[in-house]
Amino acid sequence: MTPDLMEEGARRLAEHRARAGAGGSVMAGHQPYFGQGVALYLDEITVSFDGFRALNALTLTINVGELRCIIGPNGAGKTTMMDCITGKTRPDKGKVFFGSNIDLLRLTEPEIAQIGVGRKFQKPTVYEQLSVFENLELSLVADRGVRASLLSRLNGTQLDRLGELLTLIHLKDEAQRTAGLLSHGQKQWLEIGMLLAQDPKLLLLDEPVAGMTDEETERTAELFLTLEGQHSLVVVEHDMKFVDQLTQGRKKVTVLHEGSVLAEGLLSEVQANEKVVEVYLGR
């Protein structure tokens, strides 16, 4: 993304704020613009905690519909990067744009989620006392609140959407099962389904297959490959076998180290990179 493009995006956002008026929500009717083909752009993001630099002038571009795997050793800055994208952490300097027109650093965490940025943490967070179906239902009609959602009647379109999600996340036969009784991998799928119910444009997935069986990991790879193109996905992962399944020898992988991009390219290329080998093996 060029400086001119970022300036144009900032200008559009400023105009929208002016139209909204003082005190008005900047999110009212505002959606990201993906006409330039860029879903997410981080420019020179720097974050320090008590003198430790977690991100060091990190620059990264994710294209619309792309599935990008981010790898790197512990402490490389992967989680801090996602915290900056979702508004949990404010960088010391740099820019984070969603599309070419939305400056995420000006928005709150709820506003960022509202415009289509979904994040899945390592540990699944589902309503364990409710059924699989009810968990998805709550996510589909989240604006109504828990009680109102469970007491409301779903229309035909909503029921069809829930059926599609249940099939997609391999839980159609578990729809009426209490979520707390699911396996770890099934809970991970359910949480992914809950995110998808909100129709995010960008999905941030932090070690989604940690603790899964080999079969669950393979099914998760199939799921993500199905989502590719419909959503932009950023997958942070340590499992190289899973990364290989996702990238299929043709997708770009980004390696982070000490808060910066150390290498980018095909998985085979970064695995052969001497700097990457040194970082991972400590040689």
Image (spheres, helix red, strand yellow):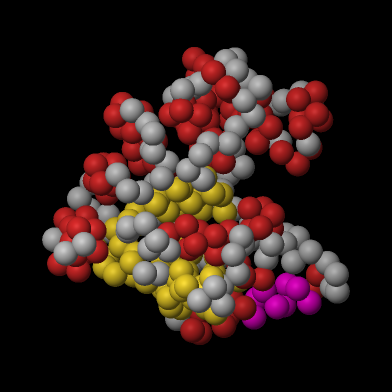
Magenta stretch, residue numbers: 11-18
Q: How many numbered marks have been drawn onto this rendered protein structure? A: 0
Question: Is residue 112 found inside the magenta-colored segment of the image?
Answer: no
Q: What residue lies at 57% left-to-right and 54% top-to-bottom? A: 117
Q: What residue lies at 47% left-to-right and 57% top-to-bottom? A: 79
Q: What residue lies at 49% left-to-right and 50% top-to-bottom? A: 203
Q: What residue lies at 40% left-to-right and 69% top-to-bottom? A: 259
Q: Is residue 236 above or below residue 148?
A: below
Given residues 139 and 158, the one toward you in this image is 139
Quadrant in which residue 93 is drawn:
bottom right
Q: Dividing the image into 4 quarters, which one contains the N terminus? A: bottom left
Given residues 14 and 244, the one toward you in this image is 244
Q: Is residue 167 at all visible to an observer of this figure?
A: no
| Residue farthest along the right direction in this orientation | 22
Residue 226, image x and y in percent?
A: 38, 39
Residue 63, image x and y in percent?
A: 41, 62
Residue 81, image x and y in percent?
A: 48, 63
Q: Dividing the image into 4 quarters, which one contains the C terminus? A: bottom left
Q: Is residue 240 above or below residue 164?
A: below
